[in-house]
Image (cartoon, coloured by chain):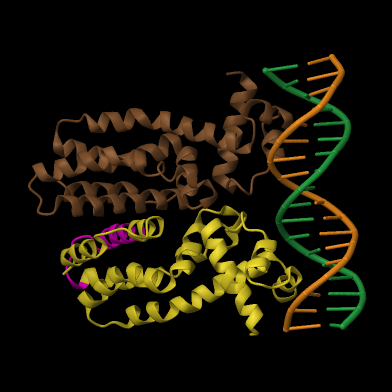
Chain colours: A brown, B yellow, C orange, D green
DNA sequence: GTCTATACGGGGATAGAC
DNA sequence: GTCTATCCCCGTATAGAC
């Protein structure tokens, strides 16, 4: 991975997440990455290829978190880690997340229909198991509800980054589950 | 409002919500609305004007629901009506909602930063009052959490319309609040 | 109100030199 | 690996006839 190639990825990630995929011309990416436009196509074939590369990178960055939670033996800890995930990811990989989430709504990229929430499935499984173990009455439904809540939370974080009181909300949420 | 103008609006709403704003050329709108491309610009000045018209229409369609809930005197009923709103809106105004929500992620349309969730504020206010009256410990935080949950729910509905078990989830959610 | 024809610019992508 | 120059299409928008 050359420095220029990396620069392209980084710039594209920023611009795609800020402006959207369709609204970001390759010329702008090239300009802000201090790179010739042709180089983008040398490295990534076409604009779609550039996006694909970004999504793969995002997946890789996400893996450790998923793995850690899936393997967490303590049920309450597992739930709390899942609740913490939105803020954690947002702090560390904000642009990646904005991109992933906004992609859900840019239907051109339907090929990733399996993607956007597919990586969440292991977490859902772990969550259901935890709620069962803690003897909740409707583990599946409750898992769904919590999932929605966290989805709403991360959406809010992305839409309004300076949002205050997030940690209070997360704390209250944790207290509800164990 | 002539028939052709209405046809343009309807077609644009469908295509914008299915494909996104940037990914939908005016030529396609014209073709599928069985209208000349020039007519779109006669009526709406430019593509942005067309979008603005759609957003305004969406607002108008939403008003009755907001008003009804804001004026609901019974606290538990108010909460339940708010919980019902996502499914209700989704059934009646699916395309409008897909458009509104996807707009949040198509940053080109930032001028509506006040819009996307601004119309939810009255509901949040009503929700906080209701939770206070029902003597919940942290009305504001709880209102936030419920708001996130409903946001996640409507997102899920839009992303996966055939989703089963929605009503069970809504029922469980209602039982939690009164 | 509506259509046809057309202008104009910008977008993605390629060729070829270094 | 990288840049410059260039192509071509398609998207938005306008002009003018009916």
**Taking B176 as reference, is A91 above or below it?**
above
Q: How many numbered marks does the figure carry?
A: 0
Q: Quadrant of residue B65?
A: bottom left
Location of residue B21 (image quadrant) = bottom right
Residue drawn at (26%, 76%), measured in percent from left and top? B78
Q: Is residue A161 visible?
A: no
Query: How far across and how far down the image is residue C12, in percent?
Result: 68, 41
Quadrant for the C terminus of chain A in the image: top left
Residue occupying image coordinates x 22% and y 49%: A143
Measured from the top left, where is residue B41 in percent x and y?
73, 70
Q: Is residue A108 magenta?
A: no
Q: Residue at x 55, y 49 (%)?
A: A108
In front here: B116 or A41?
A41
Question: Farthest residue toward the left?
Answer: A135
Horizontal and vertical percent position of residue A11: 61, 34
> In this view of the protein, which residue sits in the foreground, A139 or B79?
A139
Q: Quadrant of the N terminus of chain A?
A: top right
Asked if residue B107 lies left or right of residue A147, the reply is right
Is C3 positioned to the left or the right of B105 in the image? Answer: right
Drawn side of residue A19 relative to residue A28, left or right: left
Please tell me whether the stretch drawn in magenta is mainly helix, strand or loop: helix
- Relative to D18, is B91 above or below? above
What is the x, y in percent for residue D17? 91, 78
Say if A39 sits above or below B11 in the image: above
Would residue A148 appear left or right of A95 to someone viewing this image?
left
Residue at the image point whose x is 59% and y is 48% from the top: A19
Read off the magenta span: B133-151
Query: In the image, is residue B141 part of the stretch drawn in magenta?
Result: yes
Closest to the observer, A113 or A64 = A113
Q: Is residue A45 visible?
A: yes
């Amino acid at each position: 991975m050359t420095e220029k190639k990396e620069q392209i990825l980084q710039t594209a990630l920023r611009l795609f997440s800020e402006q959207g995929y369709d609204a970001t011309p390759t010329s702008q990416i090239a300009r802000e990455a201090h790179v010739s436009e042709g180089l983008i196509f040398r490295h990534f074939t076409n604009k779609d290829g550039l996006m694909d590369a970004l999504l793969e990178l995002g997946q890789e960055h996400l893996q450790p978190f998923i793995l850690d939670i899936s393997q967490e033996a303590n049920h309450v800890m597992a739930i709390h880690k899942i609740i913490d995930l939105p803020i954690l990811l947002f702090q560390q990989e904000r642009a990646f997340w904005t991109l992933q989430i906004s992609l859900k709504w840019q239907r051109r990229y339907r090929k990733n229909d399996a993607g956007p929430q597919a990586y969440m499935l292991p977490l859902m499984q772990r969550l259901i198991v935890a709620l069962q173990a803690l003897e909740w009455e409707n583990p599946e439904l409750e898992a769904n509800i919590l999932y929605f809540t966290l989805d709403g939370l991360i959406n809010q974080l992305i839409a309004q980054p300076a949002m205050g009181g997030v940690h209070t909300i997360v704390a209250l949420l944790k207290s509800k589950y164990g």
